[in-house]
Image: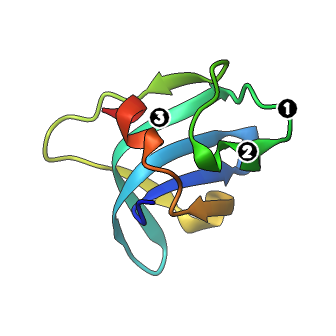
Amino acid sequence: MSNNVVLFRLRESHAIVGVVEDKTEHHIYLSIMAKIRYWGTTKGFEELVTGPTAKTILDRAEIPMGTRVEITRSQILYSLPGVDEAWLKVLA
């Protein structure tokens, strides 16, 4: 397991997976990120902890070197930290 790969459920029904680079009181910063357009699960969002399914569809974010994605903590409904390293293979 990798402690810095996290699944997030955000407001407005968005779901993302990313590598957490840094955290502050009000923000989380991701160095790698993808929006999960279609979960492809039969048991719900939490099934993705072990990695994407064969039916999961991702929209990868093109993050320029040296920059990062900022998420405001108030936008997070919940997160699942320490997900399987299988996510790193699809995020790379």
Residue at the outermost left position: 66
Q: Which mark is residue 47?
A: 2
Q: Secondary structure at mark 3?
A: strand
Instruction: Say what secondary structure mark 1 lies in.
Output: loop
Dividing the picture into quarters, in which one does residue 2 lie? Answer: bottom left
Q: Given the image, on which type of amino acid does mark 2 rest?
A: Glu
| Closer-to-camera residue (12/4) | 4
Precedes in sequence: disc 1 or disc 2: 1
Labels 3 & 2 near each other (Cβ < 8 A): no
Q: Label for residue 34?
A: 3
Residue at position x 68%, y 39% in the image: 14
Q: Nearer the viewer, residue 78 or 47?
A: 47
Residue 80: quarter of image: bottom right
Which residue in the protein does label 1 denote? Answer: 42
Where does the C terminus fall, quadrant-wise? Answer: top left
Given this view, does label 1 or label 3 mark the residue nearer the observer?
1
Crowd rating for badge 2 (residues with CA inside 10 Å; few <14, some 14–19, many 20+) = some
| Residue appearing at x 57%, y 67% in the figure | 73
Q: Secondary structure at mark 2?
A: helix
Residue found 54% across the figure and 24% down from its top = 58
